[in-house]
Image (spheres, rainbow, N blue to C red):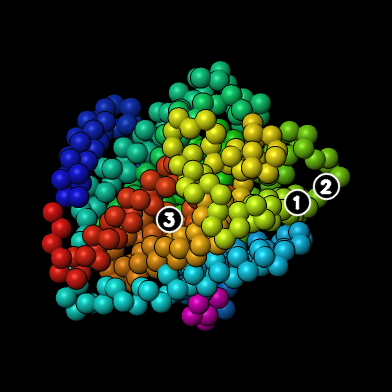
Amino acid sequence: MSLIYSIASTITRNIEDMIRKSFLFTLIFNIFEFIENEWIDSYFKSLYPSEDFLSIFKKSKILKGEIFSPLIVLVTFTLFLLLATEPVSRDLQFTLLIAFISFFIGAIVLTRFILNNSEKNQIPLFDTKDVYSIGFCLTLIGIIFLFISIASVGGLPILKSSLRYSLKPIFTMPVFLVIPGIGLIASHRLNQYKNGEISRGQVRFRFLVLTLIGMITVLTLEYRTPIIAILLMMIIIAYYGEILSVWEVIIGALIGVCAIMGIGYLRSLNELAISTNISIFSTLEHRANFTMHVLNLLNQISGNFGILHGKMLASSMPGSDLGPRMLVGKLIAWRTEVTVTPTLLGQMIVDFGKIGVAVEMCLLGFILGTGYKIIKITKDSFYIAIYSLILTYSILGVETGILDIQVLFYFFIISFIYLAAILKDKGIKIY
């Protein structure tokens, strides 16, 4: 792992140094620095509510320190179930019970047996300058492929929805690297704030700029889920970095929910999928009902041991004839040219049935529980960022599932980092 890290950090640092010396980026950074100084010293900033605004939220221990524990995934899933009015079969109820219990065991019970050598903690830490360089290059790649994607369809999908269906995955997938990219950059800024290199006002402004850059990038292609992913990830990083108040986190979460409803509603109108007589709240309910109906059907055909035995997960790989969400459409006898979201449990049920749900939900809970425990021990900005990344996709995956190849890759890399931390904490040498 150290060799891969050394090569990656060396290459990205050289690229960052080269680009920073260019006239264009020097100009951009100088403009942002000017705007930052003007904002910090501006009169309008004084009109913003203080840290003690809505102080009632600060009295809750859960809201103050535990709101983004791994159990937020189960809370989100419960809210999703409550939103849907689609009847849940008795067999699916049993499957959901297995999922919830397995996740709890992985996140809360199993993590009690790891990383307990707090006095002689051996968790490896990373140079935040290396982390920044890697994040900078990932963000740069995302922005470059944004322009390539736009050029490939001859226009902006945000201005003409039909262009979105002409986008090529080979060009759009790298655009989403902007999400972990800005997360890693944010972790470096957070570390600078902790070390007293920048002020609280500066770090908050830079978090805002990073969030806007990421959201504008993916919004240009008219994608909804990545926008929510960026907003949620940055909120979690800022929450554990203690640069956001509890009330700001709650307001940010509400904005995210409104964004989900609003973007979905507008897209449905543009695509003539609904009429103007349907309310914005109804679209969210209909979407939840549709997804739960899909899960009901998948549960019925999959049984205790599944029917594809890993083929759905493998279909996430580039070059597959059908992607995992298209495969769902084929399984339930719908059109294969459309994507169908199967919830977090869809792939688990189809591939390995109830056994798969038990094992994979326990594993997911364990990964998130490990990350949560590490940030509680170290308070390290890098670990906060990578935990925020996988927790974000786990929350969003409640509806969409964790099926995209880049997201699976994030989980694989981060799980490997966590494994290295666990082994090193137990005194096992890693080469």
Query: Which residue corresponds to mark 2?
Result: 278
Estimate the x, y position of residue 75 in percent, counting from the top left: 58, 68
**Can residue 240 be seen by looking at this rendering?**
no
Q: Is residue 52 magenta?
A: no
Can you identify the residue that label 1 sits on? Answer: 286
Q: CA distance from mark 3 to mark 2?
A: 34 Å
In terms of secondary structure, where does tag 3 sit? helix
Q: Amino acid at mark 2?
A: Ile
Which region of the structure is painted magenta?
A: 57-62
Q: Residue at x 73, y 33 (%)?
A: 271
Q: Which residue sits at x=51%, y=26%?
A: 168
Mark 1 → mark 2, Cα distance in angstroms: 10 Å
Q: CA distance from mark 3 to mark 1?
A: 27 Å
- Please name the residue shown 38% across and 48% down the image: 410
Residue appearing at x 31%, y 76% in the figure: 113
Q: According to the image, label 3 marks what residue? A: 390
- What is the x, y in percent for residue 241? 37, 64
Q: Quadrant of the C terminus?
A: bottom left
